[in-house]
Image (cartoon, rainbow, N blue to C red):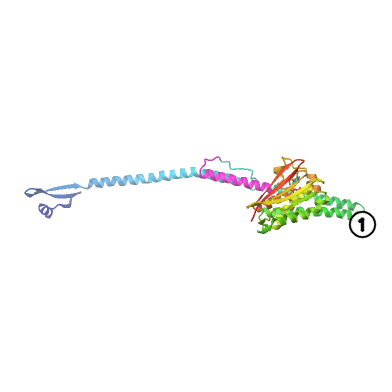
Amino acid sequence: LDAIQSALEGQSRDRDVDAGDVHLHVDIEPLTTDQGTVGVMEVGLSDDDARDTLRSFLLILALAYPLALIAATGGGIFLASRALSPIDRLTRVARKITAEDLSQRLDLRLPDDEVGRLAQTFDEMIARLDESFRRQRQFTADASHELRTPLTALKGQAEVALQRDRDIEGYKEVLTAVNAEVDRMIRLVASLLNLARADSGEIPITREPVDLGRVITDAAEQLRPAAEAKNLTLRLQSGPDVTLAGDQDLLLQLVLNLVDNAIKYTPSGGAVDVTWSADGRAAEIRVSDTGPGIAAEHLPRIFDRFYRIDKARSRDGGGSGLGLSISRWIAETHGGSIDVTSEPDRGTTFVVHLPSA
Ligand code: ADP
């Protein structure tokens, strides 16, 4: 009644009414005309409908949520396993590739996505490992072979010497031959050691100012007696003053190797020319000879380790086929390069480029 009273006084009122098991939400509104409030209107709405709607909504949620969860989980598992299956394949194949069998590749032919690129990178890495293992095996095989040859020669000489008693001169002769062979082995082992240490980055390269002209002159003068003994003309043409940041001993060895080769392979009566020049950024050393030259098919390989064109002749001259590979390493480790041009029967020119300080 209170509510009706206040509605009559022009105010809206709300109230909840429980009628049996029906719960009504009642709104009481004043009916107002020009003459003022003439009555009230009472409207009641059962909230059962809202409750029914909420209940069905709850039911839908209770059923749909687990279903959606199951579908999402299943879909997730399916998608993840599809995305990861190439990785699984990659793992299985990768497991089969061992250090002994690096010739295998994953070769998975996957699309160019993240996993495809991973497989591709993996294959490239295996290829590089394969190449480096192959070179190492080759190096070991070549080195053993190179060491076995002088050892066999030594053994032969010792056996011949021991077959019968000899006079002092006879023994001296054998010992001289043995001495020469041992010298060759010492040079070979030193070169091998150098290369092995260079490979593992163990050789400390000093970077001190080096007077290039001095180094080239020293090398040429050290080898002048050998050139004269072979009746070769060794011409040294001085170039400008050049200072390099580098390792003096290694640079000397580089020039010695090139001039020594030129003298070794040029027949007597020929000439060896050594020059150097420089522009602002780089120095160039040239060692040319009038020797037999190098046929085009050998040119790309002469810097390979143990590569000799005429094995028998090189051996007599004491070459092991390592000189040029060491020279190339020295040039490259100084940030430079080494190139060769040659004309068979006319001569050979080695050109070394080194960045100047
Ligand atoms: P080696 O110790 O046999 O001289 P190198 O690595 O110094 O080995 O040279 C490799 C090969 O290149 C040599 O065996 C030789 O056949 C060839 N060679 C190098 N320099 C010359 C040259 N100036 N003239 C002709 N052939 C050369």
Q: Main secondary structure of the magenta part?
A: helix
Find disc 1 in the rendering and name its residue.
Answer: 168
SS at circle 1: helix
In the rendered structure, the answer to whether residue 192 lies left or right of residue 71 reads: right
Q: How many marks?
A: 1
Residue at x 91%, y 54% (from the top left corner): 170
Q: Tell me the quarter of the image containing the N terminus.
A: bottom left
Q: Is residue 122 magenta?
A: yes
- In this view, the residue in front, 242 or 305, is 242
Residue ranking furthest to the left: 35
**Picture coordinates of residue 212, whole percent (x, y):** 69, 55
Residue 243 spot, x, y in % from top left: 67, 57
Specify the amino acid type for callout 1: Ile
Q: Quadrant of the C terminus?
A: bottom right
At x 86% / y 54%, what residue is drawn? Answer: 176
Percent position (x, y) of residue 198? Answer: 68, 54
State the residue at coordinates (62%, 46%). Answer: 128
| Percent position of residue 229, x then y | 83, 51
Label 1 neighbour load within 10 Å: few <14, some 14-19, many 20+ = few
Q: Point out the stretch of residues depicted in magenta.
A: 109-136
Q: Is residue 244 magenta?
A: no
Q: Nearer the viewer, residue 282 or 140?
A: 282
Camera-nearest residue between 90 and 125: 125
Mark 1 residue's CB less than 8 Å from ligand 1:
no
Asked if residue 287 shows in the view, the reply is yes
Q: Is residue 206 visible?
A: no
